[in-house]
Each structure stands twice: as structure tokens, then as C-alpha cells.
Image: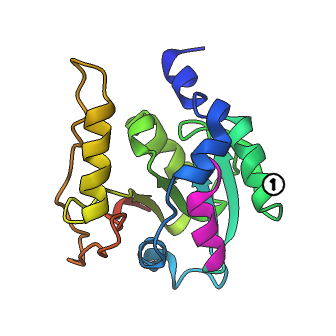
């Protein structure tokens, strides 16, 4: 097992904590991800890759998608299955999707594109997408203008062992459509990276 494989499975030991502590995705971000495939399917078929406990899967389901959740860690998928038993789950990763050729309209990765080998995952995504399909990438970012986020970051700095940094790297990129992130402290910064 490579170091990246070990890292990909490192969240499972804390799946319940992950589920309770990570935010979901705003409806606006999920709809933005679905926009490129809106005209290609009545019920979009979506592969939510690196689905974890289903934070993005939830939003996709609310928008009427049929979702298969894929994650390298079976323990994360167990938590997802307990929460949303109607979702098909599969063990897999971005570079090795367990899907047929041209089987989905959209492939999503929430908070996860930085974990994949971009070249290999791009080829694999291209293989499973139907014509007109798209790759949708989305992240939740902390909003430094939010009071609670500033308090959280200050608390983290106080709790860090001496010599360690609690600096949060930020991106000020807005979506390609120029929309601004909502002011809830976890607004979307969606980017579609590839379409077929």
C-alpha cells in the first residue's frame, strides 16, 4: 500500500467525528455543479467520488440525482450507508472508479481533488462520463470576515504546540460566473475542472 493509499483511508478511524464536524454544501453550490448537465438528463446520474460520509451526496440527492458514492475507505462508506441507505456505495478512488464506461452524467469531488493523481483521475473521469458530462469540484472555505471563523482560528492558534503553525491558507477566487460566496462562513467556491 502506498503512502497516498494510506492517507486516503486515514479518515475512517474517525468517521463519526468527521460526520458530526464537517459542514455540508450549500444548495447554491450543488445546483452550480449540476448546471452543466441540467439539459442532458431528467435524473442526473452522479458519481460522488471521495464521498466520505456523504456530505456532498446529501445535496445531490436533495436535487433529485441518482448517486453512487465512491470512497477508498469502507469505514466512511459505512457511516454514509447508515445515514442514507438508499445510496449505492462502492469502494474505489478517483484514479480507479468502479464504474462502467460512459455510465454517469457528472462526477463530483467535494474537498478531495487535491488527494488524487490529477492526470490519472482525469483520464478515469473521462472514461466514465457520458457525452455532455462534466467533472464538478467544490470546496468549503472559511470566511475570514465571519466573527466565529476568526474566533475559531484564534482558538486553534492558542491550542497549537509551540513551534507549529495554525495558519489557514485562503483563496479569494470566486466562481467563474462571478457569484460571491454566501456569508455563512462555509460558502462554496465551486470550480468545474473538466467536461467531455
Which residue does the image show at 74% across and 36% down from the upper left? 74
Q: Nearer the viewer, residue 184 or 98?
A: 184
The color scheme shown is rainbow
Question: What residue is disc 1 on?
Answer: 82
Q: Is residue 135 above or below residue 28?
A: above
Horizontal side of residue 15 vs 112, given as left or right = right
Q: Is residue 149 above or below residue 96?
A: below
Magenta segment main secondary structure = helix
| Rendered image quadrant of residue 163 | top left
SS for callout 1: helix
| Rendered image quadrant of residue 159 | top left
Tell me which segment is drawn in magenta.
51-62
Q: Is residue 177 above or below residue 67?
A: below
Residue 53 position in % (x across, y down): 65, 50
Residue 77 position in % (x across, y down): 72, 45
Residue 128 shows in this picture: no
Which residue does the image show at 61% across and 29% down from the upper left? 9
Horizontal side of residue 147 vs 86, given as left or right = left
Q: Residues within 10 Å of mark 1 (few under 14, many from 20)?
A: few
Q: Quadrant of the C terminus?
A: bottom left
Residue 1 shows in this picture: yes
Q: Quadrant of the N terminus?
A: top right
Q: Nearer the viewer, residue 155 or 28?
A: 155
Which residue does the image show at 58% across and 59% down from the upper left? 55
Horizontal side of residue 165 vs 191, given as left or right = left
Residue 104 position in % (x across, y down): 63, 63
How many marks do you count on the picture?
Answer: 1
> Residue 105 colored magenta?
no
Q: Nearer the viewer, residue 2 or 163?
A: 163
Residue 188 position in % (x across, y down): 36, 67
> Residue 53 colored magenta?
yes
Amino acid at each position: 500500500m502506498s503512502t497516498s493509499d494510506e492517507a486516503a483511508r486515514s479518515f475512517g478511524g474517525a468517521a463519526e467525528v468527521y460526520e458530526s464536524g464537517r459542514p455540508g454544501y450549500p444548495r447554491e453550490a450543488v445546483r452550480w455543479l449540476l448546471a452543466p448537465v441540467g439539459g442532458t438528463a431528467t435524473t442526473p446520474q452522479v458519481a460522488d467520488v471521495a464521498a466520505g460520509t456523504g456530505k456532498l451526496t446529501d445535496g445531490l440527492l436533495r436535487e433529485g440525482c441518482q448517486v453512487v458514492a465512491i470512497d477508498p475507505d469502507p469505514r466512511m462508506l459505512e457511516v454514509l450507508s447508515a445515514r442514507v441507505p438508499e445510496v449505492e456505495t462502492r469502494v474505489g478512488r478517483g484514479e480507479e472508479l468502479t464504474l462502467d464506461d460512459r455510465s454517469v452524467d457528472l462526477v463530483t469531488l467535494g474537498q478531495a481533488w487535491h488527494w488524487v493523481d490529477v492526470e490519472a483521475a482525469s483520464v478515469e473521469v473521462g472514461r466514465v462520463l457520458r457525452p455532455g458530462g462534466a467533472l464538478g469540484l467544490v470546496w468549503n472555505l472559511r470566511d475570514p470576515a465571519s466573527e466565529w471563523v476568526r474566533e475559531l482560528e484564534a482558538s486553534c492558534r492558542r491550542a497549537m504546540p509551540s513551534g507549529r503553525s495554525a495558519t489557514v491558507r485562503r483563496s479569494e477566487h470566486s466562481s467563474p460566473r462571478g457569484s460571491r460566496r454566501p456569508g455563512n462562513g462555509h460558502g462554496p467556491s465551486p470550480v468545474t475542472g473538466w467536461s467531455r
